[in-house]
Image (cartoon, coloured by chain):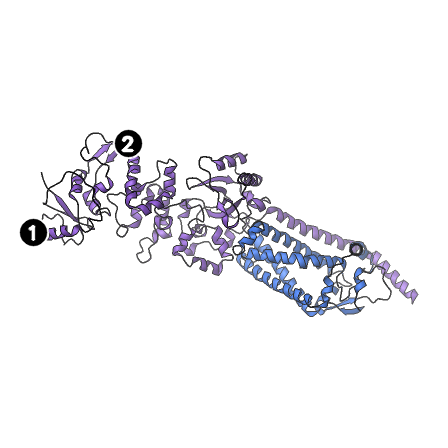
Chain colours: A blue, B purple
């Protein structure tokens, strides 16, 4: 095993703030939607907390965006445009999690600083970070001041459309979070990946022989 | 012939009688403005002839003395008789009594009888059967007399729900004289406001409720007087309170810091102000409901749908759409809206508003310490205000026309389109998304647990492959 530095400090700060924020948003969101079913905190406090945390997560998103815009590490979010390569790599990754991992096969994807996401992660994070999270933030802001943004809300089809998008996305985030929490335990040890997000270093297997199943990411792996 | 003139103090209603000039038997139309200062010579005459005046209940010196024209005195000679009455064609008995004392104390004491009753043919007046068919007909015919002087008030009245009702053929909606007795009407400055309010004659239940609410109880407070009916509803331009934004702006006229104060504690305060009528929270014991109102157009041009005069579209369409007759369901409401949209070629939408169920409920305003501030009253499933839902258009007479809607409409996925302008966190949430959330959580948990079980089941295979890999690498070395 050797250690490689793949999570720089700003990203680790962003990640843990984001993780903490998203969990708080889910909990307060559930409290807002299901007041009466359970009352851990009051509806009003849940709304106020939800609004504040929402803006913090939004500001934190800017930290993430600025870091990547001004860092070479933006390469981790570069999409694979060759669809043949993309689907082949994706299939290998899905196969690994569905079956290979059970048989004790090695992860077909090899993490590098310039391409730390496996094809499944790359696709998911591109969608989550560039589409779902901004959409959730935008709809949240509209709902936060429904009178101030009445024009935009009407243009988009009314407050129920906005609220529906916000609720459906939050269900998606809950699903994402559950799978995320499970998948991070599938490293070479239970806490391997989460420890990596604290220290910045991931432990990867020594490359003693060229792997047949290496992903497309390896192709542009920087030395 | 006896010659009489009366001079009276305006406010006290006490009057003096003394002998003076000849009585003329004809009525003439004279300008009230010209007579405005007419009390002055009368006062001088009175003062000069004080010793020989026969004073009736006159203890102190008159300060503001009104003299009646001889013509008017001629009228009062007969009409000051409480027993004077006539039988109308309708069978009603019309009292013809005009109390001289009350008239002199009234706001109209500077007018002569003929100013209003100019149509009377004095030569034949009082001879034979009355030509007035009913009290109502008399009221209608006398309205024009009021209009001659009170032009501004009349313009307001013409736009009121009362005037519209009369235009629609109502025989009950009030005209001038139903609220203001022209022969006794007194100034607001001296009348006891609540007692002078005639609204209770028709709106009796509301009037009683209002007398007991926070405004009603504070009416006696001289320093900070609470409003009487007309303070909020406008006496002459009165509109149906449940249309438009209701009386919110009227509340804010006095409670001008209310909007700012609500912002201090109420998240999304402006939205609450837009969609909730004040009594919903400030009349905590009132019955509440959701009022879905039909609007046409988009953006700033959006207008509340008006029922067409003579073509009762709304009643016809809602009754046709409501197949079970138990209130519109989600699909029926959506269909109705599409029908309106297609017909008018303008997008017809529903905008919701939370309001109290009746005028009586709206007049149970409590002290602000009792107002609802617990969000849970509205923001949870099954909340009381959302158990009753109604669809409304503005009727041609200015009053709302309603049709019952099933409460489930608010929680239906169809409401994303039909009720798209009304959403209340918790209570109007779309039910199907609750199931979706449960499905995602269960599905995800199931999938992950299945994966864990599979990993546990394959543990032997993994151990074998690890052992083999070690063996391979060992033999290689």
Q: Front-most of A2 and A59? A: A59
Q: Position of residue B436 (x, y in %)?
A: 65, 48
- Can you tell which mark lies on residue B133? 2
Do pointers 1 and 2 mark residues of a single chain? yes
Classed neighbour count for the residue bearing mark 1: other residues with Cα under 10 Å, few (<14), some (14–19), many (≥20) = few
Left or right: B422 with respect to B46?
right
> Where the C terminus of chain B falls, by quadrant?
bottom right
Classed neighbour count for the residue bearing mark 2: other residues with Cα under 10 Å, few (<14), some (14–19), many (≥20) = some
Q: Quadrant of residue A206?
A: bottom right
Left or right: B213 with respect to B295?
left
Q: Nearer the viewer, mark 1 or mark 2?
A: 2
- Can you tell which mark lies on residue B272? none
Q: Position of residue A196 (x, y in %)?
A: 73, 67
Q: Position of residue A168 (x, y in %)?
A: 63, 51
Residue at position x 48%, y 48% in the image: B354
Residue B73 visible somewhere in the drawing: yes
Chain identity of mark 2: B
Q: Number of callouts in the render? A: 2
Residue at position x 42%, y 41% in the image: B399
Question: How many angstroms separate mark 1 from mark 2 (CA)?
Answer: 49 Å
Chain identity of mark 1: B
Left or right: A213 with respect to A31?
right
Q: Front-most of A4 and B218? A: A4
Residue at position x 26%, y 46% in the image: B185
Seen from this angle, which residue lies furthest left? B52
Q: Position of residue A167 (x, y in %)?
A: 61, 52
> Where the N terminus of chain B falls, by quadrant?
top left
SS class, disc 1: helix
Residue B207 visible somewhere in the drawing: no
The residue pinned by badge 1 equals: B51
């Amino acid at each position: 095993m050797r250690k490689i530095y793949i999570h720089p400090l700003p990203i680790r700060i962003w990640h843990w703030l984001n993780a903490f924020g998203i969990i708080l948003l889910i909990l307060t969101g559930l409290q807002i939607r299901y007041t009466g079913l359970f009352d851990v905190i009051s509806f009003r406090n849940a709304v106020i907390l939800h609004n504040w945390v929402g803006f913090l997560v939004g500001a934190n998103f800017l930290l993430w965006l600025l870091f990547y815009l001004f860092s070479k590490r933006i390469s981790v979010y570069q999409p694979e445009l060759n669809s043949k390569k993309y689907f082949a790599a994706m299939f290998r990754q899905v196969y690994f999690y569905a079956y290979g991992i059970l048989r004790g096969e090695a992860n077909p994807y090899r993490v590098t600083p310039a391409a730390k996401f496996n094809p499944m992660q790359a696709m998911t994070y591109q969608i989550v970070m560039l589409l779902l999270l901004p959409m959730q933030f935008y709809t949240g802001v509209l709902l936060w001041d429904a009178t101030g943004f009445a024009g935009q809300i009407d243009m988009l089809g009314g407050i129920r459309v906005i609220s529906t998008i916000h609720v459906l996305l939050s269900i998606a985030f809950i699903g994402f979070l559950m799978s995320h929490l499970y998948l991070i335990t599938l490293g070479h040890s239970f806490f391997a990946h989460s420890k990596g997000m604290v220290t910045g270093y991931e432990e990867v297997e020594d490359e003693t022989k060229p792997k047949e199943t290496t992903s497309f990411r390896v192709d542009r792996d920087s030395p | 012939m006896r010659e009489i003139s009366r001079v009276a103090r305006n406010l006290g209603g006490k009057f003096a009688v003394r002998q003076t000039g000849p009585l003329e038997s004809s009525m003439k139309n004279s300008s009230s403005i010209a007579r405005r200062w007419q009390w002055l010579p009368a006062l001088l005459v009175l003062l000069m002839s004080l010793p020989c005046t026969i004073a009736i209940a006159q203890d102190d010196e008159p300060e503001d003395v009104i003299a009646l024209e001889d013509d008017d005195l001629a009228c009062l000679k007969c009409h000051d008789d409480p027993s004077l009455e006539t039988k109308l064609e309708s069978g009603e008995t019309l009292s013809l009594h005009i109390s001289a004392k009350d008239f002199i104390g009234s706001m109209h004491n500077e007018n002569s009888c003929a100013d209003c009753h100019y149509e009377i043919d004095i030569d034949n007046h009082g001879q034979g059967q009355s030509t007035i068919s009913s009290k109502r007909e008399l009221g209608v015919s006398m309205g024009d007399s009021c209009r001659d002087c009170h032009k501004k008030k009349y313009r307001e009245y013409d736009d009121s729900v009362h005037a519209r009702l009369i235009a629609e053929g109502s025989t009950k909606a009030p005209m001038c004289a139903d609220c203001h007795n022209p022969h006794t009407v007194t100034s607001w400055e001296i009348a006891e406001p609540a007692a002078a309010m005639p609204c209770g004659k028709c709106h009796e239940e509301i009037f009683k409720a209002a007398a007991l609410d926070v405004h009603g109880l504070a009416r006696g407070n001289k320093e900070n007087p609470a409003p009487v009916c007309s303070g909020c509803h406008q006496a002459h331009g009165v509109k149906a309170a449940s249309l438009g934004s209701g009386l919110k702006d009227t509340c804010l006229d006095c409670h001008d810091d209310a909007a700012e104060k609500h912002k201090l504690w109420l998240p999304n305060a402006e939205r609450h102000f837009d969609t909730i009528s004040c009594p919903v929270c400030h009349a905590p014991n009132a019955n509440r409901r959701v009022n879905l109102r039909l609007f046409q157009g988009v953006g700033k041009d959006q207008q509340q749908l008006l029922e067409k005069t003579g073509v009762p579209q709304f009643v016809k369409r809602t009754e046709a759409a409501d197949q079970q007759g138990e209130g519109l369901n989600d699909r029926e409401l959506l269909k109705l809206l599409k029908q309106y949209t297609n017909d008018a070629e303008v997008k017809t939408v529903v905008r919701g508003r939370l309001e109290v169920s009746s005028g009586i409920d709206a007049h149970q305003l409590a002290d602000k310490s009792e107002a609802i501030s617990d969000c849970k009253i509205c923001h949870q499933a099954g909340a009381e205000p959302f158990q009753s839902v109604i669809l409304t258009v503005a009727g041609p007479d200015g009053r709302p026309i309603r049709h019952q809607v099933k409460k489930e409409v608010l929680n239906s996925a169809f409401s994303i389109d039909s009720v798209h302008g009304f959403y209340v966190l918790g209570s109007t949430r779309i039910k199907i998304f609750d199931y979706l959330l449960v499905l995602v959580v269960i599905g995800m948990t199931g999938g992950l647990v299945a994966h864990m079980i599979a990993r546990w089941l394959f543990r032997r295979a993994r151990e074998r492959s690890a052992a083999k890999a070690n063996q391979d690498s060992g033999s290689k070395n």
